[in-house]
Image (cartoon, rainbow, N blue to C red):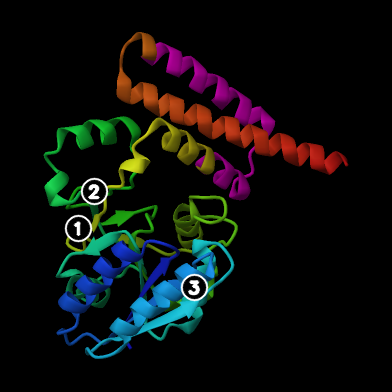
Amino acid sequence: MEFSIIVATYDRCDSLRRLLTGIRAHFGGLDIDHEVIVANNARGGAIARKIDRMMQEFCTGGSAEFRVVREPLAGKCRAQNTAIRAARGKVLAFFDDDIEATPKWLRVAADFFRREPFEVMQGPILIPPEMESDQTFLRAHQRYRTINFVKYPPDLREIKTLTGANMAIRREVFSRVGLFNEALGPGRSGISEDVEFAQRVIRSGGRIGYEPRAGVYHKVDWDRLTEEFFRLRHEQQGRSRFLYKKQSIASIIPNLMRAIWTFGWYSVMNNERKKYRAKGRFYHYRAMLVEKTKKIAGNKV
């Protein structure tokens, strides 16, 4: 089998249905052998059964095989790893459950892996067309940057990081670098599982390519465009990166103080974008300092 498309989900039933409906409509008639695996990571039995019932609709009929695997322990990475073990494809693609794939995605991805030397593909994560001119959204997005839209220059071929809502990986990469870090990501530390995985790929000598034609559209969730979510997201980033980066007090505190200084400076200068970047770094390093303090205290017990 050429492709396994893996979608980890836990409670977004409506957006999951839209994604799977689009996959079946756009990919079903292609001559590219593929399967779709939904990793059901629902926390409660009622939602888990709802996802399973919905999947029964997709598992019958059509040229592609739709399957569901259950991972009851919380964590996107755990769910993805469970699906990886069940997958049969030579290339494993990963979509978040709140995106919609563009019609040519599978054809473009198949062509990418046939002609390119890269082991990993990153595709764009795009603003939905109906939101591209919405000034309220654009102002909020410019301020918070808490929805991961990705669009590199079209002539950029190789990158050094990943954003997990739209990526594909040759199967043999997992044999070399291991599966996703289950301490990271949604349901665990909250974020950074894709960045950490990309670092392992690069350290192992692997290469990540960017394919601008393999795009997906990311749903705009207004709950993410708030002060509260902004704080939570950057605290998650700090805690997550503390788990896989060896940070000392000597590096955390200067970065925290620098963030406080730059936040004050850009507030005075009325530069909102740079002010919020500094504010995010403050939350990031403050959370990292809290985790470091807990670790030091725990070592003394």
Tell me where residue 31 appears, x and y as whole percent: 17, 87
Where disc 1 sits, the SS reads loop
Tag 1: residue type?
A: Pro
Q: Quadrant of the N terminus?
A: bottom left
> Which residue has dot 2 on it?
152
- Nearest the viewer among 62 and 81 is 62
Tell me where residue 146 appears, x and y as whole percent: 36, 41
Tag 2: residue type?
A: Tyr
Name the residue: 41% across, 78% down: 52
Provide the major secondary structure of the magenta segment.
Answer: helix
Q: Quadrant of the C terminus?
A: top right
- Residue most extreme to the front: 46
> Which residue has dot 1 on it?
212
- Nearest the viewer among 278 and 25 is 25
The answer to which of marks 1 and 2 sits earlier in the sequence is 2
Magenta-drawn segment: 237-266
In-image side of 61 versus 284 (left or right): left
Name the residue: 73% across, 38% down: 294
Q: Within the image, what quadrant is residue 94 found in?
A: bottom left
In-image side of 90 versus 248 (left or right): left
Q: Is residue 115 visible?
A: no
> Which residue has dot 3 on it?
174
- Residue most extreme to the top: 268
Q: Report the Cα–Cα distance between label 3 and label 2.
A: 25 Å
Name the residue: 32% across, 86% down: 59
